[in-house]
């Protein structure tokens, strides 16, 4: 069952993700991404992408937000919003989907926004179906 998010809360999450976008460190791609992750306790954790001259070491906006939240003791999340300067909806990359799957339920809404504030909402399980889970590590 998908968690119901009211329009006003969706817009609030997108606005905060958009503000986070301006804190991106993107000297290589010049592509700013912002994320806003809402915890089950009701707190908001913001993140932006942080690039590195060794490109593969770059940290995406979503993982910046997730790691900030987990470091603060959060373990359960209600919603995630992602935005960039693209006219297209910004979706979390595969690495971020895997990182999020450690803490996010299948029905957590992921709000993927475009630069104009338009958005599409996905259930987390739509983005990472058949995720690798602790059950997959059972060996006997
Ligand atoms: N990026 C994110 O921050 N989140 C995503 O979901 C996709 C990609 C960043 C990484 C890099 O700094 C830039 O966007 C271009 O890939």
Image (cartoon, helix red, strand yellow):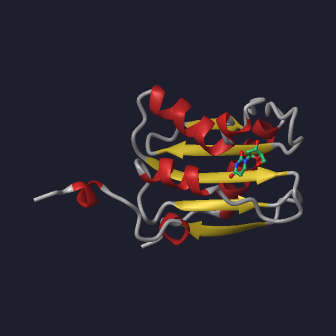
Q: Is residue 7 above or below residue 84?
A: below
Nearer to me, 136 or 84: 136
Q: Is residue 26 above or below residue 83?
A: above
Relative horizontal placement of residue 95, taking residue 34 as reference (left or right)? left
- Which image quarter holds the N terminus? bottom left
Q: Is residue 58 above or below residue 33?
A: above
Give the residue displayed 54% in from the left and 39% down from the top.
66
Residue 21 at x, y = what percent? 79, 40
* Number of marks present in the image shown: 0
- Which image quarter holds the C terminus? bottom left
Single out the residue that lies furthest toward the left: 140
Instruction: Place residue 24 in its image quadrant.
Output: top right
Residue 82 at x, y = what percent? 70, 52
Residue 86 at x, y = what percent? 87, 57
Give the residue displayed 47% in from the left and 26% down from the top.
72
Residue 53 at x, y = what percent? 78, 29
Single out the residue that lies furthest toward the front: 54
Instruction: Place residue 9 in its image quadrant.
Output: bottom right
Nearer to me, 6 or 77: 77
Relative horizontal placement of residue 10, taking residue 74 as reference (left or right)? right
Give the residue displayed 59% in from the left and 69% down from the top.
122
Give the residue displayed 69% in from the left and 36% down from the top.
58
Single out the residue that lies furthest toward the top: 72
């Amino acid at each position: 069952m998908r968690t119901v998010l009211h329009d006003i809360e969706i817009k609030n999450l997108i606005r905060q993700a958009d503000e986070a976008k301006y804190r991106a460190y993107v000297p290589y791609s010049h592509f700013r991404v912002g994320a806003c992750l809402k915890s089950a306790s009701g707190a908001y954790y913001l993140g932006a992408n942080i690039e590195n001259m060794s490109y593969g070491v770059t940290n995406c906006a979503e993982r910046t937000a997730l790691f900030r939240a987990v470091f603060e003791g959060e373990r359960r999340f209600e919603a995630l919003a992602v935005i960039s300067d693209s006219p297209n909806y910004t979706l979390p990359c595969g690495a971020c989907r895997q990182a999020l799957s450690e803490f996010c339920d299948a029905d957590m809404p992921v709000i993927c926004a475009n630069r104009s504030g338009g958005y599409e909402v996905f259930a987390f399980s739509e983005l990472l179906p058949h995720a690798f889970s602790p059950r997959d590590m059972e060996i006997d």
